[in-house]
Amino acid sequence: MIMAKTNTTLCDILNIKYPIIMAPMFLVSNSDMLVEALKSGITGCVPALNYRTDDKFREAISKVREQAEGPMGVNLIVNKSNIKFKAQIKTCVDLKVDYIITSLGSPEQTIKICKPHGIKVFCDVVDVKYAKKVEELGCDAIIAVNKEAGGHCGPTSANILIPELVAACNIPVISAGGVSNGKQMREMMELGACGISIGSPFIATTEASVSDAYKQAIVDYGSKDIVLSEKLSGSPCTVINTPFVQKTGTKRNFIESLLSKNKKLKKFMKMLTFYKGTKALEKAAFSTTYDTVWCAGPSIEGVNSIRPVQQVVKELIEQYETK
């Protein structure tokens, strides 16, 4: 086992060689990527929302089980906007996934359903207050989403957030955001994290099914090119500052902002924004288009080429072990 002087509890929880989660990425994560992650000695997690039907979702989980050994996870949106939640969690239980990462809502129901089946539940958190709540509900670990994370990031830097969570909570803390090389990974572990969730660098992999243009953008752009957009989900989300994003802007217009403050209409506006935003992301992710809205985090800074998933993992570990 590597990293003898650091806390690698994630390895023990999931029985993996290296304490790395290939993070769930909307539209990007797929079964081929998870298979290669498991073969590399890490674990991978896929958003349930990446599959339009339950049959496709079940097919993807079964494919991973058939082609690789090791733990796989599923990311669930657990608030009321996810009308597929009941079917998705039933599939997770039926097919015995190893863990679930919850996002955007209370994990209480998820924990109650998963515990009797031995499925671990990890919860995305951005502050101590919410971390303590999910700990009390019985989650198995918390994922510290810092301000360098891709997608929906938190407001706090890792060097503040991780020590705060480690001090306040009695369950393992997994760091999410800002890691694209082994040196950065070591820094997070030394802050007290027991493992690392890494997403954006895996977009530029041969197994990812997104467009070549999206993958090349991960290589060509850097951390300075990442901006927060309010137009995709109703919550600030990190995207690459392409010419199209510069042209259309990252802020909601006056009417959208006004309606979002209305108590009766704000939930509807958030759902509408999410729908329009995901359609824009989907269009850009899988086709060549000038309307490029590509989701990514600052960790693309360390991506210099499109590589296989196993090579990304190999280089991370080699860099980590190089003092």
Image (spheres, grey):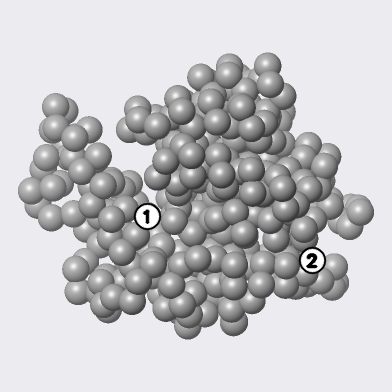
Q: Residue at x 28, y 60 (%)?
A: 280
Q: Quadrant of the C terminus?
A: bottom right
- Does 297 sit left or right of 305 as displayed? left
**Position in image of residue 298 (x %, y %):** 50, 67
Q: Quadrant of the N terminus?
A: bottom right
Q: Residue at x 31, y 71 (%)?
A: 292
- Does 187 sit left or right of 4 as displayed? left
Residue 85 at least partly seen: yes
Q: Residue at x 63, y 68 (%)?
A: 180
- Does 247 sit left or right of 299 as displayed? left
Looking at the image, is 86 positioned above or below residue 243? above
Q: Residue reaching furthest left? A: 255
**Position in image of residue 28 (x %, y %):** 49, 59
Find residue 261 and report its image quarter: top left
Residue type, mark 2 in image: Ile
Find residue 85 and report its image quarter: top left
Residue 223 or 209: which is nearer the viewer?
209
Q: Residue at x 39, y 66 (%)?
A: 285
> Considering the numbered disc 1 on the image, is that residue within a helix, a strand or a loop?
strand
Residue occupied by mark 1: 237
Residue 167 at least partly seen: no
Residue type, mark 1 in image: Cys
Q: CA distance from mark 2 to mark 1?
A: 29 Å
Residue 150 or 41: which is nearer the viewer?
41
Looking at the image, is 38 positioned above or below residue 263? below
Find residue 15 and report its image quarter: top right
Query: Who comes first in sequence, dot 2 or dot 1?
Result: 1
**Position in image of residue 42 (x %, y %):** 75, 54
- Mark identifier at residue 132: none
Residue occupied by mark 2: 317
